[in-house]
Structures are given as C-alpha cells and as structure tokens.
Amino acid sequence: MLIQAVCLVLPGHAKVAFARFFWAILARLIGIKVRVIGTAANRADGRAVMYVSCHSSWIDIPVLGGTLKARFVAKGDVAGWPVIGTIARLGRTVFVSRSRASTIKELDAMRLALTAGDNLILFPEGTSSDGSRVLPFRTAFFAVAAASAGEDPGSVPMIQPVSVVYDRLGGLPAGRACRPVFAWYGDMDIASHFWRLAQYTGLRATVLLHAPLDPASFGDRKAVAQAVWQIVADGASTLRQNRPAHPLHAPEQPASGMADAEPAYA
C-alpha cells in the first residue's frame, strides 16, 4: 500500500505496473495458477480498451488485475470496505453506484479514465454469480462505449470480451460440484470463503481473451451487450466443460437485444 501510494504521485506508468505486479503476486499467494489463452488488446491509434468479463468471485480481481493493464470498475459499496476499500482506491478503481441519479456523473468518470490513457475492466453482470453460468449483461454499462459513437468513432473504446473460469482443483478438472469452492456470491463473507479456499491446492484459473470488437459496428448498446455476452458465455461454457478453448470473434450479424439471452450451463 505504501509503495503504490508513492507510485501514484510519480509520473509515468509505475502505478500501473506495480498494481499489476501486486495482483499477480496476490493470486500466487492465494495458490491460484493463472492460465491465459489469447492476447490482451492494447491501445491502438489512441483508442482505449474496455475488458468486459464474467464475474463469479472476489478472486477475479487478483486474477484479472495480474493479467491486464487496466483499472477496475466496481460498485460504490467496495469503497467503504475496511482495508479492501483502501487497496481499491490505491489501485485507482472507478466506483459506480449504479443508481439512475448518478449515471451521467459516473459515465463521465469512466470516460475521463479512458481519455487519460487508462483501460478499464468491467463486470457488466452487476453482481457475482455461482460460477455455473454467465448472467445477462446490464446494457447501461456499455453506454460509455456507445455514447460518443456518432461524434467520433476514434473516441469510442474497443471492447475485448473475457471469460474467466476456475477449472482446476487439486490439479484435477473442476466440475459443477467444485464451483462453490471458488464462487463468492449472495451473503457469503470473504473471510470464511478465503479460509475454505485455503484448504485446497492445485488451483487454476483460465482467462480466455477473445478477439476485440468495435462497438461502433453495432446498432446500439443493447446489440453490443448481447454480442459481448454471447462470446463471454460461450467461452466460459467451453472452459467449464474442460474442452479445448480458443478466442471467439463477434457474430457477423449482431443480435438486437438481451430479451432472449439464456445462460449456458455446464
């Protein structure tokens, strides 16, 4: 925390590099080996990147934080959590309350982070799941990628869908019965969940980085959300079934909404 506090006042990318180093070391200390399939998108032609991921556990934070050079977008409640809230602020997390009254202000905060040279990691399910499926994405989270599309396509961030699945426990493939070991949702508290997780060895998380897509190529933010959800859900389903996985591309014909989206269980 002290090192990152110093990095925040220094010019350059030290604050980004150290935050990534910190999360990678934390994941290793927890005992989780991270496997990455695909390549993380980088800023191209000045365009930022929004990494859009499924979310099943607090462990997603060190796993993705140690893999991607980006700032997290988290619910405002996290800012008030003891210790964790401080760490999140030092990591330059963008906090959102998800209330309609503050939507414009929070979108401006996200745009400011993107225009300042940072990438963002977004969990558009709005909550963590039990790890057996990907919940439908909330389209409001994609407004920052569509708001300025009509003005300047170059100002719209690219989106890279990301599937995260915990697929090894004790060195063996993790099935449905193993998911409660990793998943953190409902009214679970972190302390007891961490203690249960600490009883195991041979843990692995697989991060599947799909092909980036340009939101300007879609009709509206609902179409973008549907396309990204489909990619993330399909990739996660493949990983949960312990089948060979590879980065997926956006469908040629974007869907027109989220109403018919059904989570893929495995």
Image (cartoon, rainbow, N blue to C red):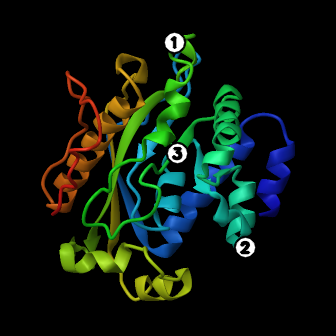
Instruction: Classify residue 94 as left or right of residue 200.
Output: right
Q: How many marks?
A: 3
Q: Quadrant of the C terminus?
A: bottom left
Q: Residue at x 40, y 22 (%)?
A: 214
* Mark 1 nearby-residue class (10 Å; few <14, some 14–19, many ≥20): few
The three-letter amino acid code for the residue at tag 2 is Val
Q: Earlier in the sequence, mark 2 or mark 1?
A: 2
Disc number placed over residue 83 in the picture, else none:
2
Q: Residue at x 80, y 48 (%)?
A: 7
Quarter of the image where one finds residue 225: top left
Circle on res. 150: 1
Q: Is residue 63 above or below residue 201?
A: above
Q: Residue at x 56, y 10 (%)?
A: 152
- How far apart marks 1 and 3 lie (CA) works out to 24 Å
Secondary element at tag 3: strand
Residue that carries the numbered disc 3 in the rendered image: 121
Q: CA distance from mark 2 to mark 1?
A: 42 Å
- Residue 17 seen anywhere in this rendered image of the structure: no
For the point 59% across and 17% down, the residue is 46
**Residue 226 percent coordinates (x, y):** 30, 37
Front label number (2 vs 1): 1
